[in-house]
Image (cartoon, rainbow, N blue to C red):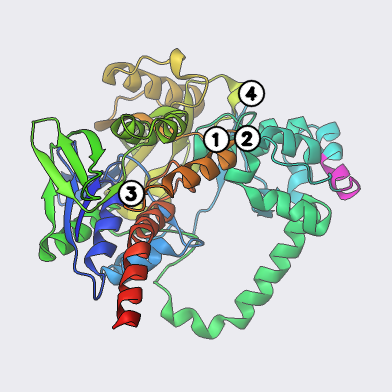
Amino acid sequence: MKLTIIGGGIAGLAAAYYASKLENFPVEITILEQADYWGGKLVTDRVPYEDSQFIIEGGPDTFVVTKPWGVRLCKELGLSQRLRGTNPETKKTYILKNNTLHELPGGLTMMIPTEFGPMLRSGLLSWPAKARMGMDFFLPAAVDNGDETMGDFVTRRLGRAAYENLIEPLMSGIYAGDGDKLSLQSTLPYLRDLELKYGGLVKGALAVRKERVNKTRSQRADQQSKPKSSGIFLTPLTGLGEIVERLTEKLVDANVDMRLNTRVSRLQPDATTGSWNVELEKGEVLNSDAIILAAPAFASGEMIASFAPDLAAELSAIEYVSTATVTLAFQECDLLRPLDGYGYVIPRREMRRALACTWTSTKFPHRAPDGLALLRVFIGRAGQEGLIDWEDQSLLEIAYEELELTLGITARPLLSRVFKWEKAMPQYNLGHMERLNRITEALDTFPGLGLAGNAYRGIGIPDCINSGEAAVEKIMAPIRMSAEKEALKG
C-alpha cells in the first residue's frame, strides 16, 4: 500500500511514524512538506554563547501531560529521560491590569478560583466583581440548550469582570482568540460539564480538586515510572526540536520517502483504480492508495476543491489568526525588577499590541546562561491583526515597547529572534463542532482520505500527535476489514 502524507509538521510526522509501525500491513510512505525544514511550528534555535547556549523556541515551548499522546510518543522515541518540567521554585504568573502586573490568585483549578483568600486579596477584581463571582454558588445550572461562546458562559456564571480580567487573558494565551466568538464546547467543554454535574463552576472545581488530591495520594507508588520533574508541562532538555529530530531519524530508518520544498497543487481521485493522483507544483504526479492531509485546513481545502467542493468549503471556512514570537536576551543587571515567575498575560481590554510575555529563563533556567535573562513576547490575536505591521523590525519594536511599558526595560538586547506564523492558529468559533460533524460525514465518502492537524479537535502538541495517529487508523480501517473478510473466506 502506498500512503502519501501532505504536511511535515508534528501531525504529519506523527502520522508517518505510526504508519511505519503498522504490523501485517506494509506501507510505502511518502511525506511532502513545502517548507525547507521539518516540524512546522516546532522550531528550536540553539544559539551558542561563550561556553553555554540559549535555547529559543519559535512556536510552542511545552506540551501538557494531561493528554497522554505527547508523553507516550516521547517514550517511544527514547526521550523520556530528557523531559523536563517548568521551574518548580518560581511558579508565579501575572495578569496585566491598568499597566500594573497582578499576581494570578492561588487556588485556581481549571482556571476557576477554589480558594477564597487569594481571590479576596487580588487586585484584579473590584469588590462588586468578587461578589458577583460568589453568586456562582447560588445560580442554577442553565438548561442544556446547545453550545455557547466562552465569553457568554463565563459571564453568565462568574460575571463580565471575571471574564475580562481573569479568564479571557488565560484563554487568549492558549488560543489567541476572541472569547466572545470561541465555542465553549470546542475549547473548554469541561466548564459546562462542571456546571451540569455539580451545579456551578466553583462547586465543581472544588470537587475536582478534592478528587485529584485523593487520586494523587493513592498513586504515589507509581511515581517512579513517571518522567523526572514531570509537572503539568514538559519539554525535552534542549527544546521541542528534539522530538522532530528523533522522529525524522526514525522515519529515515524506516525508509520513508521524505521530501522538503515540495508543494502540492491538487489531489485527484482515480475513479478507475480507486487510487489518488498527487499533482506537485513542479509537474510530477505521484500515485497513492491513501492520502493524509496534515496541512492547514484552508490549504487542504484548496487541494480537494476540484472533486469535493462541499468538504473543501467546510475546511476553508475554519478561521485562522496570524501570530509572532519575539525572543530577546538581556543582562540580568539591565532589568529593573526580578523575573520572579513564568511571565504575564495581557487582557484584550488593555488594548496592547502584545498578547503575553514569557520569562523563559525563569520558566526554564537551563535555557539561558547564568547571569542572562531570556524573554519572549507573543504578538497577534483575533480581531487585532490589522493593528500590527508584520515586518520583522516592526515586531521587534512592539516587543521593545511592551517590555519598556510593563517591565521598564530600556536596554537593547544581546540577541533577538523573530518568528512569524501566518494564519497559524485555527479558531474554534461557535459552530465548530457542527462543522466537524459535517467534515466527518463528507470524509466518510472517501475511505482513503484522512485529515490531521490542529484545526479540528485540539490545538496542542499532544492533540496533533493524536490526530496523526487517528488519521492512520481511519484509512486503515477499511483495509483491515477487507483483509478480515478475505481471511474468513479462506
**Whether residue 115 can be seen here:** no
Depth check: give the residue in front, 62 or 55: 62
Above/below status of 238 relative to 231: above
Classed neighbour count for the residue bearing mark 4: other residues with Cα under 10 Å, few (<14), some (14–19), many (≥20): few
Determine which of the numbered discs, if any, sits on residue 168 in the image. 2
Q: Residue at x 39, y 61 (%)?
A: 70
Instruction: Please state which of the two labelled residues, at mark 4 or mark 1, is closer to the viewer.
Output: 1
SS of the residue under disc 1:
helix
- Please indicate whether residue 303 sits to the left or right of residue 203 in the image: left
Which residue is the site of mark 3? 449
Image coordinates for residue 52, horizontal then vertical, percent: 19, 51
Determine which of the numbered discs, if any, sits on residue 224 in the image. none
Instruction: Please state which of the two labelled residues, at mark 3 or mark 2, is closer to the viewer.
Output: 3
Q: Residue at x 44, y 81 (%)?
A: 224
Q: What amino acid is at disc 1?
A: Ser
Which residue is the site of mark 1? 172
Q: What amino acid is at disc 4?
A: Asn
Q: What amino acid is at disc 2?
A: Glu
Classed neighbour count for the residue bearing mark 3: other residues with Cα under 10 Å, few (<14), some (14–19), many (≥20): many
Which residue is the site of mark 4? 98
Cα–Cα gap, marks 3 and 2: 37 Å
Cα–Cα gap, marks 3 and 1: 33 Å
In the picture as drawn, the residue positioned furthest to the right comes out as 138
- Please indicate whether residue 275 sits to the left or right of residue 366 in the image: left
- Labels 3 & 2 near each other (Cβ < 8 A): no
- Labels 2 & 1 near each other (Cβ < 8 A): yes
Cα–Cα gap, marks 3 and 4: 50 Å
**Which region is colored magenta?**
133-140
